[in-house]
Image: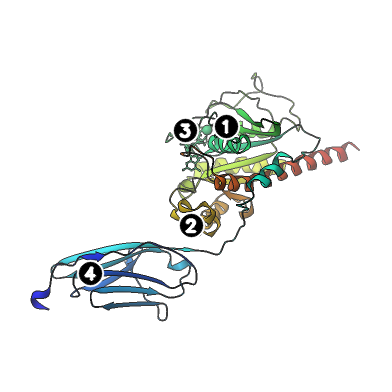
């Protein structure tokens, strides 16, 4: 070697790769010298090469990692470090392995899906179906309503205040949002509430959510964190009917907040879930902000059900809340866009068509039960 030893440098670097499972993945880097020791790492630990799976080799100044039959376990950040007496150089790349698509969204059928919901005949027992959105501060409750209204009305809707980066709730009162277009209105009302917070006396009061579920809370009520709505309040409905209560609870959580949810927030969630369950109200979970932190989705939202990261988030949510996977929907809300986006719309419509049916089934079941009790 002698005088040929120079400080290593990467002449070409490793490139990120999005691959489907089963393919062969090759990571290659060209160095300025062949007189180096090469070390491969995966996610910060030395790569443990598996016979028949990994091949690591060097030809002249070119260093290669060859992965055969890539699968989910191969996803991660790969780093090549080249070192010798004069120093070291390294470069990294991320290999993302798409899993087999496991849920279908009709990406090409926006008009049909929207029309099906717009023309959906709700049962006669109520005039409209009520959806209550609940979740932590900044989860995207107001933005979800904005997104749904935008889809129905064909233009971006921003009246329902959505806040950026605040730690206390931007939404302060109990408000409903209805859907209409130039042809008329639709029998669905979405109720926005103050966000939940971890501390016992901060954010929306858990008893207020229970009151809202049961139909005791009237629109316009201004939330007070440390005191739930009282029976003597002007905004308290003492004798709510099926038409006043909620028919579906839509829990909202941001994808990047799931793993950091504290015990106090979980307990609040549990209390609300138990109330909704005891009333038989359908409960679903929307995971928002899925566009953040997953390049596979950022590049193309249609990859959502091919993303391992999203599936993991959904499983994590299911374990956390006890809500089964088929009631969990990752969605993206309008947040930075200035134009309508068909993929955002289709993903939301796919969830909406399901919750509209469930809310309607719930009302039918409740009124059937009432009728049979009266007989
Ligand atoms: N990237 C991204 N941003 C989102 C998404 N949904 C909401 N946001 C942003 O997140 C922030 C909070 O959203 P809001 O809709 O105000 O959340 P909220 O749950 O109503 O919050 P509070 O009313 O304060 O409890 C806003 O800046 C939104 O633009 C999403 O799906 N993706
Ligand atoms: Mg809000």
Mark 3 vs ligand 1: CB under 8 Å? yes
> How many residues crowd around disc 4 within 10 Å: few (fewer than 14), some, or many (20 or more)?
many
C-alpha separation, residue under disc 4 versus residue under disc 2: 33 Å
First reached walking from the N terminus: tag 4 or tag 2: 4
Judge whether residue 281 can be spotted in this image: no
Classify residue 115 as left or right of residue 229.
Answer: right
Q: Residue at x 55, y 45 (%)?
A: 344
C-alpha separation, residue under disc 3 versus residue under disc 1: 13 Å
The residue that mark 1 highlights is 193
The quadrant in which the N terminus is found is bottom left
First reached walking from the N terminus: tag 4 or tag 3: 4
First reached walking from the N terminus: tag 3 or tag 2: 3
C-alpha separation, residue under disc 1 versus residue under disc 2: 29 Å
Mark 1 vs ligand 2: CB under 8 Å? yes
Quadrant of residue 319 in the image?
bottom right
Classify residue 251 as left or right of residue 46.
Answer: right
C-alpha separation, residue under disc 4 versus residue under disc 3: 48 Å
Residue 309 numbered mark, or none: 2
């Amino acid at each position: 070697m002698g005088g040929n030893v120079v400080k290593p440098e990467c002449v070409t670097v490793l490139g990120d790769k999005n691959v489907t499972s089963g393919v062969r993945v090759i990571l290659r880097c060209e160095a300025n010298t062949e007189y180096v020791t090469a070390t491969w790492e995966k996610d910060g630990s030395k790569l443990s090469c598996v016979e028949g799976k990994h091949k690591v080799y060097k030809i002249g100044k070119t260093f290669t990692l060859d992965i055969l039959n890539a699968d989910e376990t191969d996803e991660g950040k790969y780093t090549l470090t080249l070192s010798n007496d004069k120093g070291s150089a390294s470069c990294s790349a991320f290999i993302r392995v798409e899993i087999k698509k496991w849920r279908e969204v009709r990406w090409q059928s926006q008009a049909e899906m929207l029309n099906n919901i717009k023309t959906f005949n709700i049962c006669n027992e109520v005039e409209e179906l009520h959806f209550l959105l609940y979740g932590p501060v900044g989860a995207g409750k107001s933005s979800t309503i904005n997104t749904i209204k935008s889809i129905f009305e064909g233009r971006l809707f921003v009246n329902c205040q959505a806040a950026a980066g605040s730690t206390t709730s931007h939404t302060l009162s109990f408000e409903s949002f209805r859907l209409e277009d130039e042809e008329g209105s639709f029998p669905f009302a979405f109720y926005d509430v103050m966000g939940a917070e971890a501390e016992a006396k901060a954010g929306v009061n858990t008893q207020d959510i229970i009151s809202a579920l049961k139909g005791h809370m009237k629109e316009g009520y201004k939330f007070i964190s440390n005191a739930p709505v009282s029976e003597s309040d002007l905004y308290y409905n003492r004798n709510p009917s099926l038409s006043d209560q909620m028919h579906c609870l839509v829990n909202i959580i941001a994808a990047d907040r799931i793993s950091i949810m504290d015990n106090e927030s979980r307990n609040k969630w549990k209390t609300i879930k138990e109330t909704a369950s005891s009333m038989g109200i359908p409960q679903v979970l929307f995971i928002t902000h899925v566009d953040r932190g997953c390049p596979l989705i950022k590049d193309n939202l249609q990859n959502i059900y091919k993303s391992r990261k999203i599936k993991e988030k959904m499983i994590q949510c299911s374990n956390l809340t006890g809500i089964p996977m088929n009631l969990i929907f990752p969605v993206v809300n309008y947040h930075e866009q200035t134009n309508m986006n068909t993929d955002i719309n289709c993903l939301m419509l796919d969830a909406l068509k399901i919750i509209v049916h469930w809310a309607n089934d719930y009302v039918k079941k409740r009124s059937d039960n009432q009728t049979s009790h009266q007989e």
